[in-house]
Amino acid sequence: MTQPNIVIIMADQLAPQFTGAYGHPVVQTPHMSALAQSGTRFDAAYCNSPLCAPSRFSFMSGQQVSQIAGYDNGAEFKASIPTFAHYLRQMGYRTCLSGKMHFVGPDQMHGFEERLTTDIYPSDHAWTPDWEQPDERIDHWYHNMDAVRQAGQAMTTFQYEYDEEVTFLARRRIFEYAMQKTGPFAMLVSLIHPHDPYVARPEFWNLYDSKDIDMPATGPMDDPHTQRLRAGIEADQADLSDEDIRNARHGYYANTSYFDSNVGRIVQTLKEADLFDNTIIIVTADHGDMLGERGLWYKMNFFEHSARVPLIISGPGVQQGTQDVPVSLVDLLPTFVDIASSDGSPAPELGMPIGGESLWPMATGADAGERTTYGEYCAEMTPHPMLMIRRGAYKYIHCDGDPAQLFNVIEDPMERSNLADDPAHAEIAAKFAAEAANYWDADKVRADVIATQKQRRAVHAAMIKGQLTSWDYSPPRDAANEFVRNHVSWDDVLHRMQYPAPDSGH
């Protein structure tokens, strides 16, 4: 057995509840469903911080955000933090990134040997919140209801332009790996869809009839955290019609199908390049989208539609089935190391203790046992660190200043009933409360969040003055050596850029 290739396909803001692969009766995701049917589908997978950059920092490093100060979308992901790309490179893998990762800081590689695209979002500290003014809206980049009101169709958007490039360049690189007969490779294909704006091309919009689009199952709730979020995204001021809500969900479903079509294109390319049979494919996302549930949109909370992510593992050696124990994105770094070690290759020495636990035994048929998943949120629209604990049927959410929240997400998946003050659940709630109190020093974390915010705002205030030295990644391109040129023979180019190669006898 040789080391298998690893291909991770990541969506942005994709809640598994809104996919056919996870049982939604309307949303069409046939390629995700095919991978789930041939592999393992994890039915209680969570992000570790429900916001783009922090979630991705946790995913890459196997660390909770408080361990790496990766608090928000303006926090630096430090170059000294080891990632799964670093470890896989040590194990002989070619490592490649195509697409969005929202790296903030001057290091835009974080262990990847090559990066095929720029990022879609800025890499500086501009998107730094201010916990000392928690009620202040930063209108330049905070979400509001415009994305909901403006949902509909378009021939192209900046997000479609981006994802088309991401998938094209990833497919080209896969063929190049095949033509060059390279060793094992690990590729992350990270797409921006179905992230808002909820605007879709007609061929995906027309997959759905408006009358078939389901409305949110749960209306606005009155808990303080939900109300604070509604104010932060200005949902409390919006008079959204049923048509507005249905159009936004329609656009999201359409763009979910578009994401799924790109999953299919990557899988087809692996098959055409004769690499599929030795490749482990993982499909996941950085976080979900409330999509109107609880009167909320987007993410930034630990309710199920925001914090849950799809997670499907398929490929050689993977057992067909489902797993319903709680897992999270920090579990993927040790999973990738286990996959790379499956041929007997030694695992590298870890540079930091890992916050997760490998999913590879579960994916290959081992008993899951009991597992606990943790999540941390230290970004905008909360003035204090927020902690989620998911164990068994229960989820517990703690944030200083807010009432505790305890849900049985098996019996109450829409989280309508807070059990924290229910006498019948007093013992369970007390144990979770004690665990939350011992998990971290919340005051110390809050002080560090505020200190780093001040540092970053000072740096950003200077960087926007005078001559700009951008951290945004510019992919290298050497047009003088692309395609057919006078210093190389036409026949050499033909053989180098065709798979399978033409018959050398002609």
Image (spheres, rainbow, N blue to C red):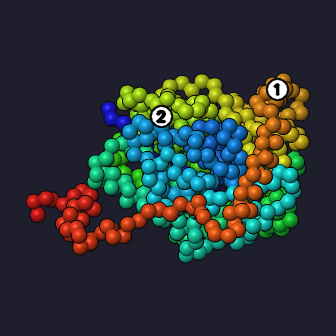
Q: How crowded is mark 2: few (under 14 residues within 10 Å), some or many (20 or more)?
A: many
Residue lying furthest bottom = 155
User: As displayed, is residue 212 above or below residue 42?
Assistant: below
| Viewer-side residue, 462 vs 86 | 462
Tell whether 43 sits left or right of 443: left
Q: Look at the image and tell me whether residue 489 can be seen.
A: yes
Question: Which residue: 82% across, 30% down?
Answer: 437
Tell whether 482 sits left or right of 463: left
Q: Mark 2 = which residue?
A: 337
Q: Mark 1 = which residue?
A: 434
Q: Look at the image and tell me whether residue 323 can be seen.
A: no
Say if mark 1 contacts mark 2, CB within 8 Å. Answer: no
Tag 1: residue type?
Answer: Ala
Tag 2: residue type?
Answer: Val
Looking at the rendered structure, the secondary structure element under dot 1 is helix
Looking at the rendered structure, the secondary structure element under dot 2 is helix
Task: Classify the position of the C terminus by image quarter.
Answer: bottom left
Across and down, in percent, residue 211 comes to 66, 66
Residue 121, quarter of picture: bottom right
Task: Classify the position of the N terminus by image quarter.
Answer: top left
